[in-house]
């Protein structure tokens, strides 16, 4: 009887192969992750391109861009709500613009009934969400409302510390800005950028101290000066940023250019959410995506000169802006 010798790996050989595989994976994984993030960033830019196209279509029909915050109160709908007929017509038909966007209670105790808009307000739109957002199912944790990562620009934040009353950008309270008003040029006036969604309840003191995930909300209607914003007194952590795409205010759908993109500083706003210093923020490495009023899409780096960044936010500041990065 002949015995056939069976060849086999020794333990040392097996460990060597495992080590080589581990090294290869360690080398390739960052490249794979980088490729995936590049794809997500491109998808984010495509979302902004569609929103910019909706802006153009709205202007073609109405001869002006939609307001940043609807009027009169309590019909405080967002720019997103006014753009729905040009990008999501089915849900747009569900909105009753004679009612409040959502149900809320005034300080007097009066309840404003927005139940007619509940179905629309709780609808999740992938178009309104950046693929790099890490929040659960595109909603602020624990919230039933449809959220958004994309906010419209009210301007530089220089006018009365970020007021939404006659701001120097394109989108503010009851605004009706058109191409005729963009004296700086439509390609040099930003309409949309990104913001990271808030966390409904801070999960830890560290998260509360992380400026990316919330806004400091003052407990009164006082002005939001840079000094007050830095001190963060007489208020509390607001973890609902971007929670409701249907509401036109700083807490949900509006930002400005007082801060550079992704600043290591806290956003702040007053209790009415109609005055604030609220930055563009994203999970993309090194900057944020933006859409200009002419529909062009730019990635703007965190290191952009702050005066240039503010110049890109105004509609008629008469600045000479050549490039955004």
Image (tube, helix red, strand yellow):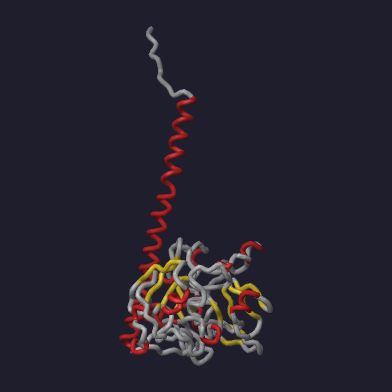
Residue at (44% x, 68% y) in the render? 288
Visible residue check, residue 146: no
Image point (43%, 37%), residue name: 21
Residue at x 46% of width, y 90% of height: 174
**In this picture, residue 271 sits left or right of residue 258:** right
Residue 127 drawn at (x, y percent): 40, 70
Is 316 or 58 nearer to us in this picture?
A: 316
Residue 54 in the image: above or below residue 167: above
Q: Is residue 185 left or right of residue 105?
A: left
Quadrant including the N terminus = top left
Q: Residue 73's spot in the image, x, y percent?
A: 53, 91
Whether residue 151 sits left or right of residue 273 in the image: it is: left
Residue 192 in sight in this render = yes
Up the image or down, 258 lies above or below 138; here it is below
Location of residue 227 (image quadrant) = bottom right
Q: How many marks?
A: 0
**Dividing the picture into quarters, in which one does residue 144 lie?**
bottom right
Nearest to the observer: residue 186 or residue 20: 186
Seen from the viewer's position, the closer of residues 268 and 226 is: 226
Residue at the limit of the structure toward the top, as seen here: 1
Q: Residue at x 43, y 83 (%)?
A: 314
Q: Quadrant of the C terminus?
A: bottom left
Q: Where is residue 201 shown, x and y percent of the image?
A: 62, 68
The vertical placement of 56 against 305, above or below, is below
């Amino acid at each position: 009887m002949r015995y056939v010798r069976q060849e086999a790996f020794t333990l040392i050989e097996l460990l060597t192969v495992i080590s080589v595989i581990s090294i290869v994976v360690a080398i390739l994984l960052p490249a794979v992750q980088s490729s995936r993030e590049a794809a997500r960033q491109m998808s984010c830019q495509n979302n902004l391109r569609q929103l910019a196209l909706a802006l153009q279509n709205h202007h073609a029909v109405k001869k002006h861009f939609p307001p940043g915050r609807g009027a009169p109160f309590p019909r405080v709908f967002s720019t997103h709500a006014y753009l729905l007929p040009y990008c999501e017509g089915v849900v747009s038909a569900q909105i009753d613009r004679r009612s409040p966007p959502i149900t809320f209670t005034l300080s007097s105790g009066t309840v404003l009934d927005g139940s007619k808009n509940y179905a629309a307000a709780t609808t999740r739109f992938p178009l309104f969400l950046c693929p790099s957002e890490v929040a659960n199912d595109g909603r602020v944790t624990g919230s039933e409302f449809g959220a958004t990562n994309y906010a419209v620009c009210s301007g530089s934040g220089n006018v009365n510390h970020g007021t939404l009353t006659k701001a120097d950008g394109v989108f503010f309270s009851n605004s009706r800005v058109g191409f005729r008003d963009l004296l700086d040029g439509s390609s040099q006036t930003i309409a949309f950028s990104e913001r990271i969604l808030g966390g409904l309840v801070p999960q830890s003191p560290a998260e509360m101290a992380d400026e990316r995930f919330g806004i400091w909300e003052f407990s009164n209607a006082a002005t939001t000066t840079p000094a007050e914003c830095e001190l963060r007194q007489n208020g509390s952590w607001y973890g609902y940023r971007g929670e409701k795409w249907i509401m036109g205010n700083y807490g949900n759908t509006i930002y400005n250019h007082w801060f550079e993109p992704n600043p290591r500083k806290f956003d702040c706003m007053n209790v009415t959410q109609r005055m604030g210093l609220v930055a563009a923020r994203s999970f993309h490495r090194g900057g944020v995506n933006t859409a200009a009023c002419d529909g062009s899409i730019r990635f703007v780096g965190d290191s952009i000169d702050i005066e240039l960044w503010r110049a890109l936010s105004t509609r008629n500041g008469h600045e000479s802006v050549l490039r955004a990065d």
